[in-house]
Every structure is written in structure tokens, then in C-alpha cells.
Amino acid sequence: MSLESAMAIAAEPQDLIEGATGKWEIVIGLEVHAQVLSQSKLFSASATAFGAEPNSQVSLVDAAFPGMLPVINRFCVEQAARTGLGIKGKVNPVSVFDRKNYFYADLPQGYQISQFTQPIVTGGEIILDLPEGQSKTIGVTRLHLEQDAGKSSHDLHATKTFVDLNRSGIALMEIVSEPELRSPEEAAAYLRKLRSILRYLGTCDGNMEEGSLRCDANVSVRKPGGEFGTRCEIKNVNSIRFVSQAIQYEARRQIEILEAGGTINQETRLYDSARGETRAMRSKEDAHDYRYFNDPDLLPLELEPGWIESLKSALPELPDARSDRYVHDYGLSPYDARVLAAEQEFSAYYEAALTSGATVQRDPKIVANWMTSEVFAVLNRLNLEISQSPISAAHLGELVDLISDGTISGKIAKEVFQAVIDGEGSPREIVESRGLRQVSDSGAIEAAIDSILAANPDKVAEFKSGKDKLFGFFVGQAMKATAGKANPAMLNDLLKKKLT
Amino acid sequence: MTKLTELTITAALLGLKTKQFSAAELVADHSAAIIASRSLNAFITETLDSAAERAKISDQKYAAGTAGVLEGIPLGYKDLFCTKGVLTTAASHILDGFKPPYDSTVTARLDAAGSVMMGKLNLDEFAMGSSNETSFYNAVTNPWRRRSDPNTPLVPGGSSGGSASAVTAEMVMGATGTDTGGSIRQPAAFCGLVGFKPSYGRCSRWGVVAFASSLDQAGPMTRSVADAALMFEVMAGFDPLDSTSANLPVPDTRAAVASTDLKGVKIGVPKEYRIDGTNPEIIAMWEEGVRWAKAAGAKILEVTLPHTKYALPTYYVIAPAEASANLARYDGVRYGLRVPAASLDEQYEATRAAGFGAEVKRRILIGTYVLSAGYYDAYYRKAQQVRNLITRDFTEAFTKVDLLLTPTAPSSAFAIGDKTMDAVTMYLNDVFTVPASLAGLPAISIPAKLDSAGLPLGLQLIGRAFDDAMVIRGAAVLEKSAGFTHRPHSIAG
């Protein structure tokens, strides 16, 4: 995608920011560093587990001992290629590793092995799920493989810095978007969708708290449709919420400067989540000259087209395809379909609730409704993940079956649902033990109706003279008489007959 | 009887097998020679005690019939090869006290073949130099002296100067060297030795302190072509730990070593190597080499390598560029020298200022400069393009010939201190060796004759990539033609 086409993309009217001199548009590009899900590092056999003792997962290669050489980890390459295919990018048959040179105590080689001019993946797209079923496609410029650095801790000692090299050499995918995002909400939607795709693919766990997904945001502002402004890069923001907040703050800061007649300095900034503001870290003048050049320790990475094809054909169904399927095959609303497909765990639960223990076809819409309303409400209330749901997918399916086959009414089902949450057993067990089975015996219902009509001759007369509303009164009385278990449809039919 | 230290590896192996002497005796005599020749400063670290112990094991292996191909042979390792538990310095102050917890692949293979490490040999700091004068552990002296001026110490060449001096002075029977732009071949020529730089990718670089990764290649330095071939076959071979290692079988060089003629072999003489102002003695030696080749049955052709004149500047862009990154890891944080300071940046500066010598600093500066924004295209990118042209020149020439024959160096050994003030003059020493390095080709230097001052001159043979056996064949035949048996006075006397 060219710069012009990125420039032509306009913000939604509600996303414009009102300044003193009129409306402003935010222009955002994101660089995401996603840690490759892999047992060992990009160029060494060291382990990658999070939270290990400092410096316990460090090989001589990771610590850059003299004469040590990198050897590419085939699995990490496969993961990056699969990710590229998953975001509909082009996996390049030849890519090249470069050295990015700079000095830091947690960068043992004195350079990071990265990919500069010839990345493993070029192009791609992320479809944003926006409110009210809207969507927007954001271009991905590239995805490349690179090494992570170690970790420096400056606050453990008054004068010393502690260095942990466990992370040194772990494989990262840097995924760069086009500057096509136009609001903090779009940025958040981009990150959510990208994270969802990575998790579906199993190429990154997407855990931002542990740093396996980190985001740099390039932010500038412009008058709607105008030239791009000077951008600032906000580094290493570690939650989706903070990314939105940082962009919001940064855009307002830039607008204030510009409206006061100032200019934006191209610089790198940090987001301070405690204060909710961004702070200058280094200016463009202080930027490193990384002196990129091809790493002579590594030959160009050549991938067989057949191998790439085989990866492509083995890709799992990804969130967009899955929500499309839910719309087309199950008749769900686009909104519900996206919600259920957004997380692999949601859709796994949903599909299990549709099929687990089913003897007849369950109605996908009814199952979806129960999940998006009742199940999610319970999870929210109890602050639980779907994997910890107090009602299993199989039990939800069973509950839907009980409604569909007329054993219980929708109203009774809510009572049963709560009882399942309270741990009283399976829906079927609860219906039996509490005697909640719906009365579908026309004789019993008729008897109840007859006694009510007999007890209320005046109301019957009023109804017959045109007071239609009283129909509800009779239904309520009949339900009461059957302890709520009368089959509502049968009750209605029978009552109508008796009253005519 | 000949002294044991005078033997070639080939002859010593026969003596050991036939029980004419023991490995313990062989190693003891070499230990004595090392002690006697300490004034040459060829060693940075001697490992004579462990060598004596290792020799006993060798004798047991001979007795048990389990001897390796180099069992009991005393060797020295250039101190660029990491050796487990033994100080490894790269002749630099910055690696102060560094004892690697690992062996380089190449030296591990030599060890596994039964050879006995006598110690770690001096070199130019980080292999950057052509005279072995840039070593933090001081200059190495060439055992050879000018006939007319026997009191002036001469350089052994570099960067594998300690290796050349030690093999020449019969302190070891062979040594490992590394060659980035001529660092095996030029010191071999200066010391009257055989020095073989195999095709790039033949010998693993794993565990060898890196100078310029796309050029560095380990190889043997010996007193005969047969010995070089023997060591080469042990040192070479695919190593999955080095991504640039060639996954090819190691050639069997026995037939090549036994060759007595060059019938059917076409040898090219590149006209661009006839540089104006070259020492006439070098030209004469080269012409003699051509006559030997012809007499041995080779067909001689003049060939052209048009981009030869750009090789030296190209090399002095690419090698420093790679070195500037390769040497970034010496930062005082994890091993080696650390000069403490108040901040991290100051510690880097103090450590690297104290740890690196002037030539290394010069090359880091050059390398950093040629990779810098605004200069990259003019220097580094251009150099890579020229490197491709140089490689193409060779590819073209090798469609017509099997080997190229050239001098190894533009002069014989010069006096210590003669050229240290002028880096460019020093760099010119590599003019004949650098092109083959840039193209990754196998090349060997063999001693041809003495010049009028009584100093050895070397002939270089360059072959097709991975046709190492052809290079050894040519060298074996020309070695017989040259019949070079001269030895320095200090040794022969």
C-alpha cells in the first residue's frame, strides 16, 4: 500500500478531535512485537519459559561469547511464516538477516539480529471489528523476525544495574501496520484482532502483561484529509487500554502544540500509565545510527514454495472466517458472530455447547443468545475466564435441549441456569429434583383453566364484552395454579378456545 | 640421526607407528625447543605440562592400536581458537583472563585425532595485521635473518605470525592459522612454510574469535604440502553449528599429495598481478614457478582478472565493517577486561580504550564509518558490488583454467618496526592474497626459493571454490620442483 493511499483514508466523523482551530484527525501506525511461541530461542537452543531464575536460560550464543555463532531455529521460521499467511501476507521465498548495531548492557552481541530490507513477510491485512457490526481493513506493511534483548533492572541497587539475559535471543515477530488507523478505538481493535489471530495460530500467546506482546504507536495529527504531520513514537506500551490512552493523550498534546503555533519534534516517547501521559525519551537527533548490514554469520533464508503452500493449507480457521461461517451457516447476527469468534476459547465453548451430548440439532441462535447474554453476564459478575465458566458447554447445550423439547419454558430455564451455576448438578438433574418439568398435559391445563374461569365469572363477562387485556390475567392465574410449569403455548391455545 | 623436531608430520607418524620413538619423546623434544626459542615470542601461552600428559595417552593408544590420524603430533594453535580452560586472548588486552568453557570445532577435531596441543600462538591483535606487530603480547620474531644483516630481527608476517615462527623454528610440527586476507599465506611465505587457506566454508568458524565473518577461514601451516593436507583433512568438515559451513564431504587428498606431474592441468597466470614496481626478484620467482609448472606438464595460459586493482580497497571496507560489529561484544560486561567507571557509557569507553590496540581501533573506526548513514552506499554497498565483480572475474577465469599461479606477497620479510608507521604500506602486503579471500577460494602458499638477501619467497596457487584437492595437487608437484630445503641459520646452525 502506498503512502498516498494511506493518506487518503479518512477518520469516521465521530473520531475527529475538536480543537480550538477546528477538527483534527489522528493518524496512527502500530509496530507490534510478538514473541514467537517456541520452546527455544531464535538462534540458540536455550529455553524460553517466562519467569525462570535470572540468567538460567542463557547459552554461550545468547551471552555472545567469542566465536559463538547463530543457527536459525526452523520452528521459529515456521511460526513467522504461518503468522504471515494468517494475516494474508506474502511469505518471501528469500529473506535476509541483518545486524542492527547499538551498545547496551543487555544486548550482549552489541547488535541485534533482525531483518531490515528483506523481511520474511511482506504485506497483509487486519480487519477491524468496529461497533455496530462495522469493519475496516488495515494494511500490514511487513512482518520480520528478530532477536529480543535481555532485561536491565536499574532499581535493584543504588549504583548497579542488574542484567538478566533469559530473554536475550528469544524470537520476536515485528509486525508493522500501515499508517491507516484513525482513532484510539481503531488502534485497540487492531491489537485485539491481531492478538486473536496470533492465538488462533498458536504463534504467540498474546500475553501483554508478561511482555510477549508489546506495542509501539506512531502518532501524528493532521487537518482532515491534509498532509501527514510529524509523528512521535510511543514505545513499549504493555496493554491495549494503555495504547488507547497513550494515543489519546499524545494526539491532544500535539494538537495543543500546533494550535499554539508550535511544531512537533520527531521523537521517541514513553507512556507513563500512572500519570496517564507521554514523556520525551530521545529526539530524532539522538537516534541511533544502527548501521544495518547483512549478518555474515547467516546465509539468506530460503523457503521452498511447496513448504509455504503446505503451511498455508494446514492453517486453522481464523477469526474472520469463523465469524463469517457463524453468520452464513448459523444465521447469527454479525455482531454476535464476531463476539463468539473473537477469542478461540469463546468459539470453542460455543461449538461445544452446540454439539456436546446433542441427540438433536440445537438451534445455533438460541445457544448464541444464551452464551452472549447469560454466560457472559455470569463470567463478568464473577470475574472469570470462559475456561473457568461455572456452567460447562455441555450443560448449556442440555439446557437448550430442555427448552427446545418443551420440558421447561424459557422462564424456568433461567431458574435452572442459576441452579447449575450454584452447583446443584446438570440441568436435567435440577429439573427432576426440583420438579420443574413443564406441564404439557392438556387435561391438567384444561382443569386449571376451568377452575379459574369458574372462580371469576365477572372477569369472563368483561373479557367477552371486549376487555381483551384480561387475557393476560387468565394466563397469569393459570400459571400460578400450575406453579409456572404449564406449557405457555398450550395454555394460550386452550384459554383462547375456552373464552370464545 | 635427525633431530625429532626436524621431522615432518608424515615422517613422525611413521616413526611413532614403527616405534622408533615415543610420543613422549617427540613431545619432550618439542617442549625443549619451545623453551629454547622463547626469544621469538611465538607463544602467548605454553601448555607443556598438559602436552606431556597427553603424549603418554598417545603412547598408550599406539600400544593399544587405537591411535588417531595425528596421534602424538605436537601442534600449536593460533590464539584465536578457543580452547577449553586454556587462556584465549586473540592477542588482545580486552580478553584478559578469558578461559573459554569450550573448544573450537577445528581444534576439537585436531584434539580428537590425537594431536598434542603445545600451547597458544601469538598473532596480530584480533588477526588484524600483516606483521604480527599489533599483538598486545608484543611482536613475534621471524627465525630467518638477512644474510647480510643477521642482527636485524624480521617480522614473521601476519596475522598468523606466531604460528609461522613456531613451525619454522621447529617448536611444533604444524600449527593452525586463520586467513582473512592472507593471514596464513603471507606469513607462510615470509617463513618458508606451506600455508593453506581452504575454501570458505570448509573449516568451521565455531569457536574461532571472529574478525571478518564472511572472510575468516582456518587452515594449516606446516613444513610440507603432505603435512598441510593431513591437517586439512582433520580440520575440515561440515559443522551444523556454523551456518556458513559447507555441507560437503572432505576431499581425500592422498592422490593429490602423491601427484608427480600436472599433465592435463591448465594453469592461469593473471596479468593484473604483474603490478608496476613489483620487486623484480618476486617477478623472477613467479616466472620460475611458471616454468616448473610447464615442465611438470601443465598447460599455461594468461588470464585476466580485471577487477584485481579494486580488491584491496574493497577488502579494507568489508573486513573492517564486519569487524566493527564482531568486536562490539567486547564491552567489559560479561568477560575479559573491565575498566570500571561511573556510568555504563563511560565503562564502555574506558574498557574499550584500554582493551584495544591502535590497529584494532583504526579498523573499528573505519568499519563504523563505512556502515554509517550517508556513507553506507558509497562504501559498504559499493564494496559488496565490487566483491561480486571480483568473484565473477575468478569464475570466468576458472572456465578456462584449473588453477591460478601468482606470487604470495610483494616482498620477503621486512624488519620489525619498518612499516608500522604507515598503515597503507602495511595493507599493500595483502595485494596478492586478498582477491582469493574475497571470492572464498582455496589458496595455498608454498616456499619457492630464497631471494638475494637469503629470505624465503612464496608462490601462491588459487583454485576453484571447493576444489581444494586440485590446489593441493598443484602445490605438491611444485613443491617437488622447487625442492626447497633451506632452513634458517638459527635452526640449521
Image (cartoon, coloured by chain):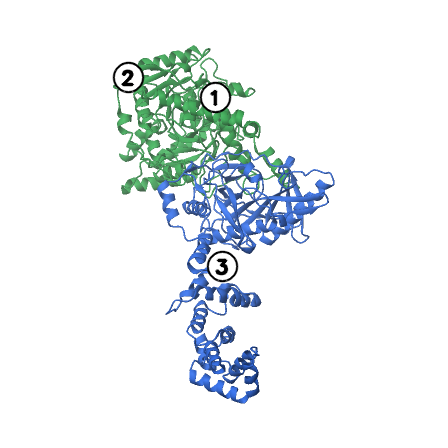
Alpha carbon of mark 2 to alpha carbon of mark 3: how far?
A: 84 Å
Nearest the eye: B144 or B213: B213
Quadrant, the N terminus of chain B: top left
- Rendering colour (chain A): blue
Question: Residue A333: which numbered mark, if any?
Answer: 3
Q: Are marks 1 and 2 on the same chain?
A: yes
Amino acid tagged 2: Ala
Q: CA distance from mark 3 to mark 1?
A: 71 Å
Disc 1 target residue: B312
Q: Position of residue B351 (x, y in %)?
A: 60, 37
Tag in front: 3 or 1 = 3
Tell me how far mark 1 sits from mark 2, CA to CA: 30 Å
Residue type at mark 1 is Leu
Q: Chain of mark 3?
A: A
- For label 3, count other residues whose C-alpha is less than 10 Å away and answer few (under 14), some (14-19) or many (20+): some
For disc 2, the marked residue is B298
Q: Is residue B333 above or below residue B200?
A: below
Up the image or down, A415 lies above or below A461; here it is above
Which class describes the residues within 10 Å of circle 1: few (<14), some (14-19), or many (20+)? many
Viewed as shown, does residue A233 lie left or right of B66?
Answer: right
The residue most toward the front is: A465
In the rendered structure, the colour chosen for chain B is green
Give the residue drawn at x 38%, y 22%. B394
Residue A458 higher or lower than A261, as above or below: below
